[in-house]
């Protein structure tokens, strides 16, 4: 037992020296996590996009159309840009100055006053997913409000109803939208919690795989294995440093960055601590195994840099897993981020517990064992290759 | 001079096919990632998300509304729940994404002029599914509510036209242009592929000059380029541009038709702006490569510069929603003007005149970076010449 501790301690110190002596590892492991988490965090610090520019072509030029335009402009989400006519409004959208246009045709007010249905036109640029859906949602609400207002007036004038009764008649069926766990339905509120763990994962994967590739490049794999700990000793000795370092980062992110970015945390801290530990325990052998696949550090750095978006896209957060073909669901199931995100979002946003997500917890545990086996096999393969060299 | 540039170009192509740091990033990764992204989004739309019905009304109307909800693209009713606790548990376990509640005595209240409220609960932790679910649920429920109002007015003897005008006095005709059904394959995959290409072009060209020291071939480059840094830079840039064009045609003529939309996508405007993006990326990479002799440092600069480009570009989250300093930082990356031009060329199919500002923005990068690359390389070549002398 003391031998094992000495061996682990030796590899721990060795890893520290390796990182401080290599500027790429230093940058990836010690500077990048902190730099990225603050840097990326600022992008979404306002969380919602406001004042989406909408070109309004008011051909009616009536009291009602002016009121309607004013109502649109008063919405937090919309900033009205006046356009002389439909063509001008379209040009504003083509030049990217407006995200859509709204046409109030001639005769709108007179039609409404004569109790004839009138049509207004909204065209949004669907190529811009978020602004276009926000515009459509907001203007639909305004349209419903106008409808209710007209009915209210009609009931009061012709039905002889008092205001309360007229209001009840105007809106007999209401739809109440309750966006749970992200009340503003904001993109920032959606992306930031996962962005933080993605930074944690990617810096660990890139840094540790680079470190293993560097050991391979230098022919040092036998050194790791022969330091009396064997293959598993090499795995734990090297991994312990990363477990402590990234454990500290995780604690820092969950406390400092969550507060700075005003992100809600609705679950229990002990559950989150256990979850993060399991996540790091699965990621470390995965990174070691990935590192054994690269012949040198440069190649590891270069190719692993491309892994960020694929991991994010396939983990089931941005796009539901069930909407992917089966083969991609299997690939996703091999990535620790997939079960992790399911549990993490449940704890952080919905106030869930580990017990609520037992299936995903078991999935994460299986991946830990799976990657430990792969890392051991990878180290053994390199050990065999490098053994004669070390002699 | 032209012959010398051509020789450098051919020499560079040979190097690209020889060294893994080049061919893996330039020729293997783009098609692999392209197929990968196309595979993830191959079903194009989010469909049949699990939704619970919390039906306290248990009435003909609530059953009719439930039936209408089930007919939509995104809603698939998977369970009935009886309380808010069950709703919360379902959302926490991830067994449902949304729930719709019909209140007690809903039909009676509607008939007796008491307003009723139908509640739509969605788990907005998952933003995209929740937005799509809300869109479909709201459409069904608002139409149904309109139907209730219409039948009430008609029962009073009101003419159908007038009743319709009262139910919906201002009819909103909404058009979602260019991607009407929010097709994710169409929306996201091309953008993600471009991100891969800009990353790989910058990261590989950041190793184009300094890797010559690593392979001990700087002398050979000096001879091939006739001692001229501009010849060397021009030749290498042309070689990389040729590979970028190869990637472009591989993606648009082979991979996209086979694995993504099923259609060929050949477009002059897109090709022009793509070329400008690639030239900007190559110029920046060559500048880094000429300045930094340390390969890992050059690769790190490439990674740190390119990896945030997608989120800063405004592709998913609009730039005007970012703090001002992030908007300035975004302008320092060629992907940002490209994305604006890309929306106009790819989705809106507009002529190039609508993209002049973005094209000018992309041209700024080579105008600054290429001369710097030449100056720094010329200094290195001069040192090399002195050493030989």
Image (spheres, coloured by chain):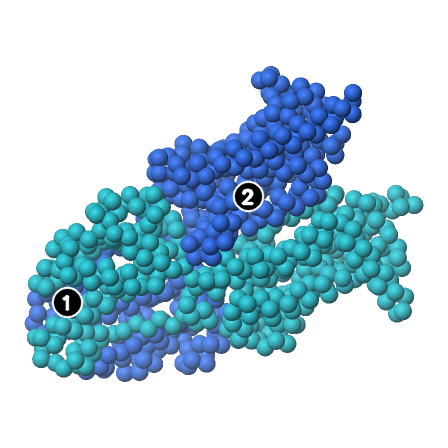
Q: Is residue B58 left or right of residue A358?
A: left
**Which of the 4 image quadrants contains residue B33?**
top right
Tag 1, which chain?
B
How far across and how far down the image is residue A224, in percent?
Answer: 84, 54
Q: Which chain is cyan?
A: A
The answer to whether B389 is drawn above or below residue A157 in the figure is: above
Q: What is the number of the mark on residue B196?
A: 2
The answer to whether B43 is drawn above or below residue A161 in the figure is: above
Residue bearing the label numbered 1: B166
Q: Nearer the viewer, residue B274 or B228?
A: B228
Mark 1 packing: few (<14 Cα in 10 Å), some, or many (20+)? many
Q: Are marks 2 and 1 on the same chain?
A: yes
Residue at 60% in and 62% down: A197
CB of mark 2 within 8 Å of CB of mark 1? no
Mark 2 packing: few (<14 Cα in 10 Å), some, or many (20+)? many
Q: What is the number of the mark on residue B222?
A: none
Q: Nearer the viewer, residue B138 or A249?
A: A249
Secondary structure under the numbered disc 1 in the rendered image: helix
How far across and how far down the image is residue B349, in percent?
Answer: 35, 39
Which residue extends farthest right? Answer: A391
Question: Chain B rendered in what hue?
Answer: blue
**Which of the 4 image quadrants contains residue A372?**
bottom right
Q: Is residue B148 left or right of residue B24?
A: left
- The answer to whether residue B173 of the structure is visible from this angle is yes
Secondary structure under the numbered disc 2 in the rendered image: helix
Residue at 25% in and 74% down: A173
């Amino acid at each position: 037992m003391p031998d094992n501790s000495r061996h682990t301690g030796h590899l721990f110190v060795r890893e520290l020296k390796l990182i401080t002596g290599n500027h790429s590892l230093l940058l990836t492991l010690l500077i990048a996590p902190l730099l990225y988490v603050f840097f990326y965090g600022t992008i979404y610090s306002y969380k919602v996009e406001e004042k989406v520019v909408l070109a309004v072509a008011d051909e009616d030029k009536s009291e009602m159309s002016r009121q309607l335009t004013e109502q649109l402009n008063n919405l937090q989400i919309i900033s009205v840009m006046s356009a002389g006519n439909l063509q001008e409004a379209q040009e504003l959208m083509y030049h990217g100055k407006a995200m859509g246009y709204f046409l109030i045709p001639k005769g709108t007010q007179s039609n409404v006053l004569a109790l004839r249905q009138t049509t207004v036109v909204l065209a949004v640029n669907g190529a811009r997913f978020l602004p276009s859906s926000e515009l459509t949602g907001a203007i639909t609400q305004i349209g419903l409000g106008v409808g209710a207002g007209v009915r209210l007036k009609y009931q009061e004038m012709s039905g002889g109803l008092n205001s309360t009764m007229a209001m009840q008649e105007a809106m007999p069926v209401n739809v109440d939208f309750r966006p749970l766990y992200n009340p503003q339905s904001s993109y920032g509120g959606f992306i930031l919690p996962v962005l933080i763990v993605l930074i944690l994962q990617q810096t660990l994967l890139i840094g540790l795989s680079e470190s293993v590739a560097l050991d391979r490049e230098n022919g040092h794999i036998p050194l790791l294995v022969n330091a009396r700990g064997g293959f598993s000793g090499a795995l734990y000795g090297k991994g312990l440093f990363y477990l402590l370092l990234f454990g500290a980062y995780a604690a820092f992110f969950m406390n400092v960055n969550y507060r700075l970015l005003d992100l809600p945390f609705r679950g229990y801290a002990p559950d989150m601590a256990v979850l993060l530990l399991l996540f790091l325990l699965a990621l470390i052998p995965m990174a070691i195994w990935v590192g054994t696949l690269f012949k040198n550090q440069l190649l590891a750095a270069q190719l692993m840099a491309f892994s960020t978006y694929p991991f994010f896209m396939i983990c089931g957060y941005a796009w539901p897993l069930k909407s992917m073909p089966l083969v991609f669901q299997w690939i996703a199931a091999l990535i620790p981020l997939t079960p992790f995100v399911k549990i993490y979002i449940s704890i952080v946003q919905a106030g869930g517990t580990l017990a609520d997500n037992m299936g995903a917890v078991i999935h994460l545990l299986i991946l830990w064992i799976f990657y430990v086996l792969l890392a051991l096999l990878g180290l053994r393969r390199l050990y065999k290759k490098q053994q004669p060299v070390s002699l | 001079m032209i012959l010398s540039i051509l020789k450098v170009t051919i020499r560079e192509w040979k190097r690209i096919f020889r060294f893994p740091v080049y061919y893996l990033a330039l020729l293997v990764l783009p098609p692999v990632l392209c197929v990968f992204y196309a595979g993830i989004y191959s079903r194009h739309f989010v469909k049949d998300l699990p939704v619970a019905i919390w039906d306290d009304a248990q009435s003909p109307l609530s059953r009719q509304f439930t039936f209408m909800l089930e007919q939509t693209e995104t809603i698939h009713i998977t369970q009935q729940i009886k309380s808010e606790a069950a709703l919360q548990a379902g959302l926490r376990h991830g067994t449902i994404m949304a729930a719709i509640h019909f209140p007690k005595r809903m039909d009676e209240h509607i008939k007796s002029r008491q307003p009723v409220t139908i509640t739509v609960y969605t788990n907005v932790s998952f933003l995209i599914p929740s937005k799509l679910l809300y869109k479909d649920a709201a459409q069904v429920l608002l139409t149904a509510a309109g139907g209730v109002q219409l039948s009430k007015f008609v029962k009073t003897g009101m003419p159908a036209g007038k009743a319709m005008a009262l139910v919906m006095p201002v009819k909103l005709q909404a058009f979602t242009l260019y991607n009407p059904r929010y097709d994710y394959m169409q929306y996201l995959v091309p953008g993600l592929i471009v991100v891969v290409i800009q990353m790989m072009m910058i990261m590989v060209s950041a190793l184009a000059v300094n890797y010559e020291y690593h392979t001990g071939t700087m002398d050979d480059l000096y001879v091939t380029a006739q001692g001229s840094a501009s010849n060397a830079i021009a030749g290498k840039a042309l070689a990389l541009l040729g590979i970028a064009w190869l990637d472009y045609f591989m993606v648009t003529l082979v991979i996209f038709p086979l694995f993504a939309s099923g259609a060929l996508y050949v477009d002059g405007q897109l090709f022009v702006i793509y070329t400008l993006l690639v030239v900007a990326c190559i110029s920046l990479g060559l500048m880094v490569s000429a300045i930094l002799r340390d390969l890992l440092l050059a690769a790190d600069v490439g990674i740190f510069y390119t990896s945030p480009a997608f989120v800063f570009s405004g592709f998913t989250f609009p730039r005007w929603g970012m703090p001002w300093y992030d908007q300035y930082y975004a302008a320092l990356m060629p992907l940002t003007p490209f994305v604006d031009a890309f929306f106009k060329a790819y989705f809106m199919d507009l002529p190039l005149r609508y993209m002049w500002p973005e094209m000018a923005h992309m041209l700024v990068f080579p105008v600054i970076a290429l001369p710097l690359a030449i100056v720094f390389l010329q200094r290195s070549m001069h040192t090399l010449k002195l050493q030989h002398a």
